[in-house]
Image: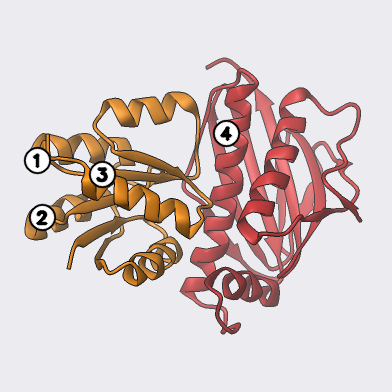
Amino acid sequence: MPKVLIVDDAAFMRTMLRKVLTDEGFECVEAANGHEALARYAEGRPDVVTLDITMPEMDGLEVLKALRKADETARVVMCSAMGQETLILDAIRAGAVDFIVKPFKADRVRAAMAKAMTKAPV
Amino acid sequence: MILGPSVPAEAPTHVRAIMFATYARLGMLFNSEPSFGETRVCPALGVRANDVVVIVSFTGMVKGHVLLGMSRPTACAVAATLLMEEPAEFDDMTRSAVAEVANIVAGGCATSLHQEGYEAAITVPSVITGEQVEVSWPNLFVIETSIVLPAGEVELAVGLQVGDA
């Protein structure tokens, strides 16, 4: 069973993503902030990470860069309420596989996960 | 009530962008077009914001706040609608759900502001609970309106100041 790490400071959003991803056959692990995300990633090496941007302590772009520095094969899908082109480009340049703008439809999440799962490790 | 936001003629471009972004994001979130009440310009007045208040702030070229206010039953209904569950008691999941609604609205506003040439980032939401909470933003251009969602009626207030980055 593929494993996904859901990183979002909002318990509600983690629950929404967990519902979609569990139905898709993913084992879900959650983290509520960037530091917890880095620890969970190191512990379990999930196949994919979904990553919010606006979070306290470390924002999502900082977490993305730290994850990719620790593991350049990390497959990360950003999931943010902000959808500015510059932000999306920054995330893609930093190694994100895809960028979902909230609110999301389940089909958009499925498509992003399929894209991430088929992406060959760098 | 009318479909879509009614924006006063004197409202600046960035306020107009915010109102239409709010309309679009809430429509996507609830899969239903929200109805907006009359939009009021209320500089320096306190915003009566009901019992549950969520505030997300902007930083950058546009400084200010977006506020969503609602009753506790409406907050519970918002959470239940989005989670597709039966309404439960007002709890941490309810707080998280209404905070995320405000986050999504503010994120849409920041995106629209970017398209208008104003760079803005958003803060994490603050959730305040009380009885008929009032919030004041002196020195900001403040507009407020009511919005009818499938889960109930919410108050929207936006207070902004456009400055340098």
Q: Quadrant of residue B87?
A: bottom right
Where is residue A50? Give x, y as percent: 31, 51
Q: Do dots 2 and 4 share one subunit?
A: no
User: What amino acid is found at the position of numbered circle 4 in the picture?
Assistant: Ala
Mark 2 vs mark 1: which is more N-terminal? 2
| Visual colour scheme | by chain
For disc 3, the chain is A
Disc 2, disc 1: CB below 8 Å? yes
Q: Label 4: which residue?
A: B110
- SS for tag 2? loop
Letter of the chain shown red in the rendering = B
User: What amino acid is found at the position of numbered circle 1 in the picture?
Assistant: Asp
User: What amino acid is found at the position of numbered circle 2 in the picture?
Assistant: Arg
Q: Label 2: which residue?
A: A45
Letter of the chain shown orange in the rendering = A
Please indicate, yes or no, whether residue B63 appears anywhere in the rendered image: yes
Q: Report the front residue among A84 and B28.
A: B28
Q: CA distance from mark 2 to mark 3?
A: 12 Å
In the image, farthest residue toward the top: B164
Structural crowding at the residue carrying mark 2, measured as other residues with C-alpha within 10 Å and reported as few (<14), some (14–19) or many (≥20): some
